[in-house]
Image (cartoon, rainbow, N blue to C red):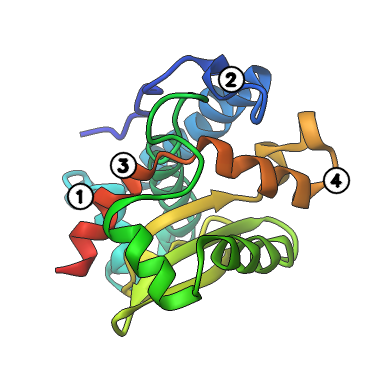
Amino acid sequence: MAHEVPALPYDYAALEPHIDADTMKIHHDKHHQAYVNNLNAAIEKHPELGKKTADELISDLNAIPEDIRGAVRNNGGGHSNHTLFWTILGPTGKPGIGGEPTGAIAEQIKKDFGSFEAFKKTFNETTAKQFGSGWGWLVFKDGKLTILTTANQDSPLSQGLYPILGNDVWEHAYYLKYQNRRPDYLAAWWNVVNWAEVNKRFEKVKK
């Protein structure tokens, strides 16, 4: 079964003014679609992989045939990462979007980082330093929340870690509005984080 780009759960302009509609159209319709197209082309050569989700494929890259492993790593990762990305964002001004988190993730952030502001500062500083294209992630490792970055479209799933929250710092995610000002994008991005979805992901990994 061919992989498909999931529909956005909100309008292209729903994240304005923090993420502009033009960026969302290009990011979702062009970039994400390209990852899906390339992933489908790669796994056509190995029909036995057709039933696996993108998450399953990149969770065990050693099991992927060597001739397509690089393509699956890059494009399966791009598909998985972006599918997560759209779901953990939400329309500006809606309840539970932006602001400080609530629920279990809020308690864990306070426990592991001292405060939400301290966590946000560390996440932004760590992710801003990611050289070139990549992602900033929040994972739950050894009983505590950990911030890490990956290059290109690499996913924590390939390291045996489940991403709770992730921010795309490829230039295509922000360049139309923020140009080379990655820290400004990182600061604005928190206004559209969907904490209800982040809590759902945290509940899965906390068990």
Q: Earlier in the sequence, mark 4 or mark 1?
A: 1
Point out residue 31 in the picture as x, y percentages from the top left corner: 57, 33
Q: Residue at x 45, y 64 (%)?
A: 138
Q: Earlier in the sequence, mark 2 or mark 3?
A: 2
> Mark 4 and 2 residues: CB-CB less than 8 Å, in contact?
no
Against 84, residue 93 (above or below) is: above
96 displayed left or right of 135: left
Against 8, residue 137 (above or below) is: below
> Where is mark 4, residue-wise?
180
Q: Secondary structure at mark 1?
A: loop
> Where is mark 3, residue-wise?
196
Q: Secondary structure at mark 2?
A: helix
> In front: 103, or 202?
103
Label 4 – label 1 distance at C-alpha: 37 Å
Q: Quadrant of residue 135?
A: bottom right
Q: Earlier in the sequence, mark 2 or mark 1?
A: 2
> In front: 6, or 201?
201
